[in-house]
Amino acid sequence: MLEVRNLSKRFGGLLAVDDAELTVPEGAIVSLIGPNGAGKTTLFAAIAGFLKPDAGRVTLSGEDITGLTPHDVCRRGLVRTFQVVQPFANLTVRDNIAVGAHTRIRGRADARRHAETIAAELGMSEMLDQPAAALTVAGRKRLELARALATGPTLLLLDEVMAGLNATEIEDIVRVIRGIREAGVTIFLIEHVMQAVMSLSDRTYVLNNGAIISQGTPGEVASDPQVIEAYLGHGASQAITREATAAGGPDA
Amino acid sequence: MSEQTRIAGWTVLLALLVLAPLAITSGRWIEFMELTLFVAVLGQGWNILGGFGGQYSFGHALFFGTGAYIQALLQFKLGWSPWATLWFAIAGGVLVGAFVGYLSFRYGLRGSYFALITLAFAEAFHVLSRSLVAVTEGGRGVALDLNLDPDRALTTFQFNFGGDFLKAYGFYYTILVILMLAYAATWWMEHTRFGAQLVAVRENEDAAEALGIDAFRVKLGAICLSAAITAAAGVYYTQKFLFIDPGIAYGPTKSVEALFAPIIGGLGTVLGPLVGALFLHGLGEFAKETIGLVWEDRPGLDLILFGVVLILVLAFLPRGLVGLLDLAWRRLSGAAPAARKGKADA
């Protein structure tokens, strides 16, 4: 469904995304993990049209979408959410979601009705008349998701929708994401909450210093020495193996 | 406030404005109402782009002046009928709006940069209208011939020497019709996808883009509609005063007048500019009357007062007077507070 080939993005002297290659198959949940500053959000932004890649190609269902504007990308069925939530603060939850619905629905009343349906699916019916500014963190994260979903996407790019949520809220949103996939939407997500990554994803890519250093099922990736070193520092992988085999005390 | 209550409120308000001349017989108060409605039209023009779209222009005189000048010059130089020139005047305003909008929005100018570029364009037109003497008659301005024949009052769009009714109320109803059209257009806009997308762009342009909105096109549409209404105010001005010069057309006064009314009345609300204009000019008139009694007449006093009111509204009423009315209505009807419609940090 989504193919990224040799994508690079440079900011001055910093190579934020370095020759990234990845594939998101239709109907799958694929995750992108990596330490802070690895370039995950930059990669998302380059895919969704918010940044022009310096090199490489992005195709959606076989169609080249490299360098298109974000609204064009959205109309073709790929929509992203923001890590730092971007609600229309002065509008109600209903009107926020309706803005997304307007991508495919012209009439105001129809868009609002569609917004109500989406809100019901995500368990937000109670909040419809509240201004977005009055929502809790969990509510805002969910609103990001609802708005994106209202555009009728085929592929959703979710940027850390679980950050800042407590355990119950995470369970809730994991259930919601599964439901969205079951409804036929492919999902590509950036996440730091490992338990969610492990339980949700069919496939995981690991980004470090802008480059994809590992890929596979979540289990494979988690035991990859390169990944452990990327997260815990040079030598960490060996240290852990030593510890596991010798079951000895911590070595300096 | 429910949709039905709003519609009922509007009907009452419009009926009052239509019937006002029955109660107001003094020419001076009719003049006052004409001026107020004129500012309310100017304000609505600004409000579409600034209030609904969040693009604060500091040079709306650009559209006002272009409308006024085209209306005057086509009659003065080519002898066209004012009823024909007015379409060109409005189209000219839209064209200038599209041009400025294309340049600023294509290059992503927002906030104070947009305000500055509109101010710069208005000033550039100010200078041009002064220096292109062959076209605009320069600093002397354009004075249209006065029509003294009462039978031709309608065809010349000059009501000063018309029959009793035209002479007294012709221009009042002219500006009222322009106001109704402008406010109906704004009301329509608020109830369409275009309006929803414009507000979304105001609230958060990146999020709007991510949700499939072509922010450039939406803003361009808004500046064209905004310019059309503002240019229509220019047409009215030319016909009412039969005179236009560079200072009146492109000077900063009209740009400031255009933004005062909606900011004080309530940004991004259909009613805001009208409420703001009524309040400001009512207050100005009241001040002149009362202070004039004990003190000699001080020109410019109303402007000082406007400034004070603007500061107070910005500090304490971010949603303007309409927000205050809305709050009072909710208190009275016991309804729960709903989302703010205006921009909070205006």
Image: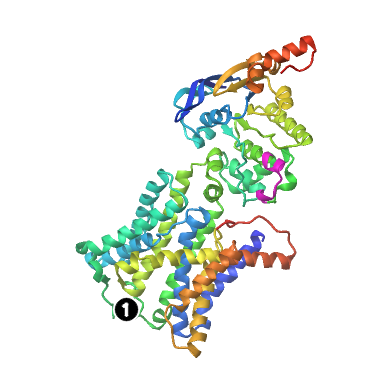
Q: Is residue B191 above or below residue A247?
A: below
Quadrant position of residue A32: top right
Q: Is residue A61 magenta?
A: no
Question: Where does residue A82 sit, x and y in percent of width and height?
Answer: 60, 37
Question: Where does residue B72 sit, x and y in percent of width and height?
Answer: 29, 67
Q: Is residue A68 above or below residue B318?
A: above
Residue under the image location 41 percent in, 58 percent down: B228
Secondary structure mostly seen in magenta is helix
Secondary element type, mark 1: helix
Q: Three-letter amino acid code at disc 1?
A: Asp
The foreground one among A97 and A135 is: A135
Q: Residue furthest top?
A: A245
Q: As drawn, is B64 to the left or to the right of B182?
A: left
Q: What residue did someone put label 1 on? A: B151
Q: As drawn, is A92 to the left or to the right of A11?
A: right
Subunit of mark 1?
B
* On-image quarter of the N terminus of chain B: bottom right
Residue under the image location 47 percent in, 63 percent down: B259
Q: Residue furthest bottom?
A: B294
Q: Is residue A138 magenta?
A: yes
Question: Where does residue B185 sit, x and y in percent of width and height?
Answer: 49, 58
Task: Specify whether residue B81 is in view.
Answer: no
Question: Where does residue A226 sit, x and y in percent of width and height?
Answer: 63, 15
Residue under the image location 50 percent in, 85 percent down: B291
Task: Specify whether residue B87 is in view.
Answer: yes
The foreground one among B26 and B42 is: B42
Q: Is residue A232 above or below residue B250?
A: above
Q: Which residues are magenta?
A: A131-141
